Amino acid sequence: MGEQEKLLDYLKRATADLRAARKRVAELESTKSGFRITLIGYWLIGLPAAWLLAYAANLDTLGIWLDLLTGLAATAILLLRRYDTALHTQFATTQPVQAA
């Protein structure tokens, strides 16, 4: 195999790897699941926590602030879990590129 053929083969593999990487990044940037996760974190977890902490626990304004912290923490944990799952799913199916 000549030098030009080796270079062409390498460029073809590099281009294929870049396309695959671009596809994986685009899939990770999907906004639908992120939107759903923030709805769960802020509305299904945060809002009830606000009522419980502010009124049921008689913490008033402090309860509202603790609720904001609770909703933000829940959302952050759920988003990190989604991101980690997506990374493991995508990189488990890829095969490493062998050097020429």
Image (tube, helix red, strand yellow):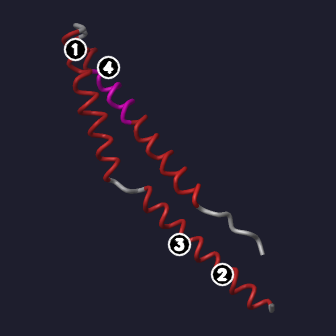
**Mark pair 1, 4: CA separation:** 9 Å
Closer to the N terminus: mark 1 or mark 4?
1
**Label annotation for residue 4:** none
Q: Is residue 70 within the magenta segment?
A: yes
Residue that carries the numbered disc 1 in the rendered image: 54
Asked if the residue under mark 1 is in contact with the one under mark 2, i.e. CB atoms within 8 Å, the reply is: no
Residue position marked by numbered label 3 in the rendering: 19
- Secondary element under disc 3, as helix, strand or loop, is helix
Q: Which of 48 and 96 is in front in this view?
A: 96
User: Magenta includes 87?
Assistant: no
Residue drawn 28% across and 14% down?
A: 62
Question: Nearer the N terminus, badge 2 or badge 4?
Answer: 2
The x, y position of residue 67, in whole percent, is 29, 22
Give the residue at mark 2: 11
- Which residue reaches farthest top? 58
Give me the C-alpha separation between circle 3 and circle 1.
51 Å
Instruction: Answer left or right for 23 relative to 46.
Output: right
Residue at 37% from the left image edge and 56% from the top image edge: 30
- If you read the primary sequence from the N terminus, does the residue marked by circle 3 or circle 1 appear first? 3
Along the polypeptide, which appears first: circle 2 or circle 1?
2
Callout 2 secondary element: helix
Please state the extent of the stretch shown in magenta in the rendering: 65-75
- Pinpoint residue 88: horizontal percent, then vertical percent: 55, 50
The residue labelled by disc 4 is: 66
Q: Which is in the foreground here, disc 2 or disc 1? A: 2
Residue 30 left/right relative to 12? left
Question: From what the image shows, is residue 95 above or below residue 46?
Answer: below
